[in-house]
Image (cartoon, rainbow, N blue to C red):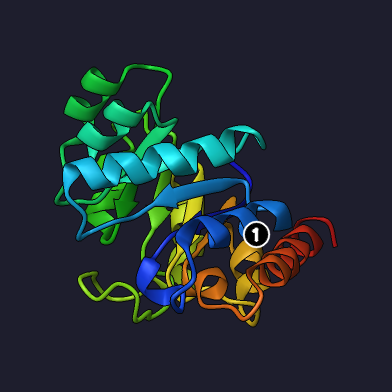
Amino acid sequence: MRGLYLVTDRELCRGRPLTQIVRQAVEGGVAYVQLREKGLSFRDFVDEALEIKKLLETCRVPLIINDRVDVALACGAAGVHLGQSDMPYSEARKIMGAKTIIGLSVETWPDVEEAERFDVNYIAVSPVFTTPTKTDTKEPWGLEGLKKIKKFSRHTLVAIGGVNEKNISAVVTAGADCVAVVSAICAADDPFLATRSLKDLIDSAVFP
């Protein structure tokens, strides 16, 4: 996995339709979209996922569902992202199959060590910086923590948490293979321009 990864948050979209934000982000260069919905019923979550998936398929951008293996299965998503309190990785892999993208959040060093036993597609280093969009995580890893994980882990690293235009280049330089953002796109005045700017910064950090 490489590039920019959008994690959605409808509460940050400033009243704009989520499909509008996702469409603009994809047009701006987002490589992956994770649909995160904490308050929707199963049926509503699946209906929304199917709508987003249809939008993404024309651009060949994978849809990843946050937390909910059942929703991912029901909508035929490309993958699922698991937190430390979600379904265990081994069970999710049995259910989802070998070709499905499965990502796993790591919030402590023991999480990082345990993840080495799993054939996850990526680990999400969470959070890199303090972020108001997710308050149930451990202490931020910081750039030094990200560097430490990069040296230790065999997995692709997705950095998430407080990443924006001001620090995204440093995050890539510290070892992130892919960078996930939430408010930097969802809350932006112009999600398309915000995405394009973030992608350009990633590209510049990778190919200085």
Residue neighbourhood size for the residue with mark 1, other residues' Cα within 10 Å, grouped as few (<14), some (14–19), many (≥20): many
Residue 38 vs 135, above or below: the answer is: above
User: Who's the residue at 65% across and 33% down the image?
Assistant: 58
For mark 1, give the secondary structure.
helix
Taking depth in this image into account, of 165 and 126 the one nearest to the observer is 165
Quadrant location of the N terminus?
A: top right
Query: On the picture, is 59 further left or further right than 21?
Result: right
Query: On the picture, is 54 further left or further right than 127?
Result: right
Query: On the picture, is 160 further left or further right than 179?
Result: left
Please identify the quarter of the rendering in which residue 39 is found: bottom left
Residue 76 vs 177, above or below: the answer is: above
- Numbered marks: total: 1
Please identify the quarter of the rendering in which residue 153 is found: top left
Residue 92 rendering spot, x and y as whole percentages: 22, 29
Residue 25 rendering spot, x and y as whole percentages: 63, 58
Please identify the quarter of the rendering in which residue 118 is found: top left
User: Who's the residue at 34% across and 75% down the image?
Assistant: 133
Taking depth in this image into account, of 121 and 193 the one nearest to the observer is 193
Residue 24 rendering spot, x and y as whole percentages: 65, 59
User: Who's the residue at 55% across and 62% down the image?
Assistant: 21
Taking depth in this image into account, of 47 and 203 the one nearest to the observer is 47
- Pointer 1 residue: 24
Quadrant location of the C terminus?
A: bottom right
